[in-house]
């Protein structure tokens, strides 16, 4: 089986390579099965990420349908599956709070343009050289932030004002609301998390997230539990895609959202290439990093046109795709088609999903995202510990970009100091 390394530098989608190598009915059946499997995982996850990001669940589904389809159709990885990612929750929610939904769409579109340019300029390899301690630090920081963002819906808490974005003020506001917590919401949310973990342990091939969310929805409806649902909070989701629409574009508005777009671009590039690298390790293939960035950029621009939130390659869905036996990028494209079928045929069922159940899904996502063992291992050597803790701490108390920049600068300084210290020790 060819590993793709001979053409890894080319701007050629892996879909084209797949067809040039030969594609038959057996591979199509494998892709169809894998696409359905990933879609079953992606539907509740996409809605949960959208709600946690401060937008209605349909915006997450739009991203999975439009963005996910283009990531697979145009990407440089044979097995990459794109869609909304938990890592973007903090960035998306902060952007919506500051600029509104239209401002978010402009931010996603600008980010897509920048990702496309990064790929076209062959800068994909630079992103892949970000120090390992930095990636672990910001990933763990994002995981903690996601968990904190779910405490409100998980506890059914009612805040007197808007929920603060920064971690410390958020925790203070939630602490003041604790006397009004909703036991039914807590039970549903923790029950969903526990059921997902249990299914994963006992029946790893079953769609644990979907099973848990459906069970919680049935329990909430049959027992008439006093909990907020997608229907009561958002009025349900539409039965299909909206017409494409450009966000409001002006020079002052572009300059306002540019810093946020840069953060989206940095995180999107890192996440997508890390996910593609995971797929490489599972399959023995080699992705084309620059083509992957171009595809991610085009997918984000298209997603924004249809009202979708930011898109990136996602490790959980990509790994599920590989384990489900995908043979080509068509599996990822089919996963998007299956999500569209769900919206058209069964969107009304989403109205019964409790928000606490979606919070339970993201509790598991944040737990899985945090590289706990690797975090502890990196603490054993002081240079990597310093880089790790600086990235982790600044990601928590300031923002993702500050954490990544500080971690990279600190890692570069340590590398320079250690390099200069080696000849001096030899002289002794």
Image (spheres, rainbow, N blue to C red):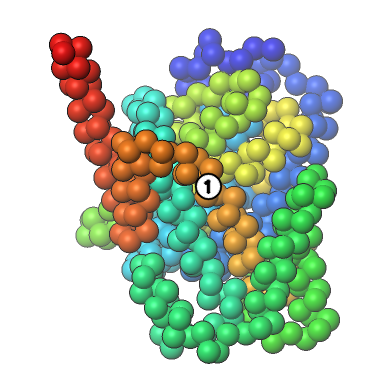
Residue 296 in the image: state x and y as whole percent: 48, 39
How many numbered marks have been drawn onto this rendered protein structure? 1
Residue at position x 32%, y 38% from top? 382
Residue 80 in the image: state x and y as whole percent: 60, 35
Residue 339 in the image: state x and y as whole percent: 70, 53
Residue 48 figure quarter: bottom right
Residue 360 figure quarter: bottom right
Residue at position x 68%, y 63% from top? 193
- Can residue 243 be seen here? The reply is no
Q: Quadrant of the N terminus?
A: top right
Residue at position x 83%, y 81% from top? 222
Residue 58 figure quarter: bottom right
180 vs 256, left or right, is: right
Residue 354 in the image: state x and y as whole percent: 68, 74
Which residue position holds label 1? 372
Of the pair 164 and 395, the residue shown nearer to us: 395
Of the pair 186 and 69, the residue shown nearer to us: 186
In the displayed structure, would residue 258 be above or below residue 378?
A: below
- Can residue 11 be seen here? The reply is yes
310 vs 200, left or right, is: left
423 vs 133, left or right, is: left
Q: Quadrant of the C terminus?
A: top left
Residue that protrudes farthest toward the front in the picture: 428
**Callout 1: SS:** helix
Of the pair 130 and 5, the residue shown nearer to us: 130
In the displayed structure, would residue 81 be above or below residue 191?
A: above
Characterize the local packing of mark 1: few (<14), some (14-19) or many (20 or more) Cα atoms within 10 angstroms.
few
Residue at position x 43%, y 64% from top? 93
């Amino acid at each position: 089986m060819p590993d793709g390394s001979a053409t890894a530098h080319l701007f050629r989608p892996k879909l084209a390579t797949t067809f040039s190598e030969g594609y038959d009915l057996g591979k199509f059946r494998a892709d169809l099965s894998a696409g359905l499997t990933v879609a079953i995982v992606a539907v509740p996850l996409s809605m949960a990420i959208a709600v946690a990001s401060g937008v209605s669940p349909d915006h997450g589904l739009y991203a999975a349908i439009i963005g996910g389809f283009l990531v697979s159709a145009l990407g440089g990885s044979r097995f990459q599956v794109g869609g909304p990612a938990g890592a973007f929750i903090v960035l998306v929610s902060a952007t919506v709070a500051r600029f509104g939904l239209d401002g978010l769409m402009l931010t996603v579109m600008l980010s897509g343009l920048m990702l496309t340019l990064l790929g076209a300029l062959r800068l994909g390899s630079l992103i892949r050289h970000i120090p390992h301690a930095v990636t672990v630090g910001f990933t763990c920081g994002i995981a903690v932030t996601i968990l904190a963002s779910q405490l409100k819906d998980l506890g059914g808490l009612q805040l007197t004002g808007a929920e603060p974005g920064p971690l410390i003020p958020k925790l203070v506001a939630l602490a003041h609301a604790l006397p009004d917590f909703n036991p039914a919401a807590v039970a549903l949310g923790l029950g969903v998390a526990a059921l997902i973990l249990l299914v994963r342990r006992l029946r790893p091939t079953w769609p644990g997230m979907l099973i848990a969310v459906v069970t919680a929805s049935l329990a909430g409806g049959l027992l008439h539990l006093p909990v907020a649902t997608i229907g009561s909070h958002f009025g349900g989701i539409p039965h299909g895609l909206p017409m494409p629409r450009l966000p409001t574009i002006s020079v002052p508005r572009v300059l306002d959202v540019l810093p946020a777009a840069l953060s989206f671009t940095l995180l999107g590039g890192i996440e997508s290439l890390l996910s593609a690298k995971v797929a490489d390790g599972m399959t023995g293939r080699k992705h084309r990093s620059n083509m992957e960035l171009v595809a991610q950029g085009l997918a984000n621009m298209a997603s924004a046109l249809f009202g979708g939130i930011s898109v990136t390659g996602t490790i959980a869905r990509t790994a599920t795709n590989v384990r489900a036996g995908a043979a080509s990028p068509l599996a990822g494209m089919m996963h998007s088609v299956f999500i569209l079928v769900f919206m058209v045929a069964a969107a009304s069922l989403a109205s019964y999903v409790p928000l606490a159940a979606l919070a339970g899904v993201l509790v598991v996502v944040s737990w899985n995202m945090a590289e706990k063992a690797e975090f502890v291992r990196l603490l054993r050597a002081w240079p990597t510990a310093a880089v790790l803790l600086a990235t982790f701490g600044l990601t928590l108390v300031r923002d993702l970009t500050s954490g990544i920049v500080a971690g990279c600068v600190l890692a570069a300084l340590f590398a320079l100091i250690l390099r200069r210290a080696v000849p001096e020790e030899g002289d002794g």
